Amino acid sequence: MSEISKLNSIDDTIAAIATSIGPGSVGIVRLSGPQALLIADRVFSCRQGRPSDFKTYTLHYGHVVRKEGDAREVVDEALLTVMRAPKSYTCEDVVEISCHGGMTAVNAVLALALENGARLAEPGEFTKRAFLNGRIDLTQAEAVLDIVRAKTQAGLRVFEHQLKGELRSFLDDIRRRLMGCYGDLEAVVNFPDDAGEQDGKRSVSARLREACISIERLLAGADQGRILREGIKLVICGRPNVGKSSLLNVLLGQERAIVSPIEGTTRDTIEESAQIKGVPFQIVDTAGILEPRDMIEEEAIRRSHLHIQQADLVLFMIDASMPVDEQDKKLAESLQGIDKVLVINKMDLKPSFALADARALFRAEEEIVAISLLHQQGIDDLKGAILKKALHGQTFQSKGLLLTNIRHIQALRKALFEVNRAVEECDRGLSLEFISERIRFAVDELDRITGRSADSDLLDHIFSEFCIGK
Ligand code: GDP
């Protein structure tokens, strides 16, 4: 059990709507805590008896009822599930009432649970209880949030691994190895002898180096992890009418943006998630405006610039049938220092410039792809160029243990820094106390990741990101 769990006594019972808000066939109200079954007795009427007598992992048909004296008002027809402590999501008694979906029935059932002794749960409080009760660590709690928000199948797979505790096991293993080194150094400090000290430092240094290699290997995949979580940010820009919205629609495989021969149809940026050959992307279609005519267009330009600055890759589009003009050149200039692919669209029309003119817009090493969105030609080549450029020639890895969370990455980098320093100090023959202290700092960083030593501010921050009912 973590330090924090000892500090928190969880003696009230929480309730919340666990399904999403809006029309749906079923809505679930979830209760967790020592009074969950008692509250269920008060609000649920069933031929099979009282919920507090039901066995764990059983499902019962009945009615949610408001009882006042001898009067009973049926609120809704429902199924009630019982999951007794400690084998439940929160490790507490959990009751789930599945009633009719839509807002009215679930709200009425929730209100009744609150009238009968439950407290409205805070965002993420069910998962927080699972953490505080020691069933999951912080990396697994964060995986729950990631699973709920996962945008791609590949991302989902990685988060499922994290939920199973693979990152936790990795970190526990590193921690065990570091604490082993720490223990050995402490033993030498307590029973000093010169030869023992030299041998101890040599062995500790070698083991610390191995730990560094393991951490470095995991950190090496962090870029791919970020892609899985957020997608590669791909921004399409170019002057009006070159075919940006048409390209967005082709990459999405659906008519998302309005395609029109009328200039300035897209007046704001459009952002959508898509996969290109299995790799997740966040694609932004910019407005392509250079000279704003009103405040809306001024804002659209500001947003376009912001997206371009944050882009992993920009697709700069020009129209093959129009001469490369000042607007194209101005836009191209604004993209200096940003990874990009030059896309020449409308190759089905009579070309009005030579490829060399287009080349002159950018440095020689930039990728150029000629396409016709009208005839769907060159799309596969374009996808290939996007992947090559965005992944810097590497293959995309979406299996195994991957770091996807910036909090984990930063803490692990700090841990690596401390372990590296400890190795250096061992090799330089520094006092054992210094080396031990470095190892402790590294272990503290690992403990912050898993939540062994996370403070309440960090926990509040993490769980406030959750939705209510999770
Ligand atoms: P945007 O303003 O850059 O977003 O451009 P749109 O996608 O709205 O396209 C502007 C016009 O160009 C529309 O009428 C499209 O049908 C047309 N268009 C787009 N791609 C092609 C193409 O490859 N060939 C031809 N001939 N027309 C295209």
Image: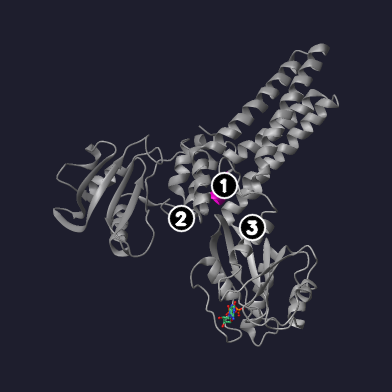
- Image-quadrant location for residue 319: bottom right
Label 2 within 8 A of ligand 1 by Cβ: no
384 and 237: which one is in front? 384
| Magenta stretch: includes residue 461 | yes
Q: Is residue 250 above or below residue 328?
A: above
351 and 218: which one is in front? 351
For the point 76% across and 18% down, the residue is 200
Q: What is the C-alpha distance between the residues marked 3 and 1? A: 15 Å
Check disc 3 and report the residue beneath it. 387
Q: Is residue 186 above or below residue 158?
A: above
Pick out the residue farthest to the right: 428
User: Which mark, residue 467?
Assistant: 2
Check disc 1 and report the residue beneath it. 398
- Amino acid at pointer 1: Ser
Residue bounds of the magenta highlight: 456-462
The image position of residue 78, as x and y in percent, is 23, 53
Q: Residues within 10 Å of mark 3 (few under 14, many from 20)?
A: many
- Amino acid at pointer 3: Leu
Looking at the image, can residue 267 be seen?
no
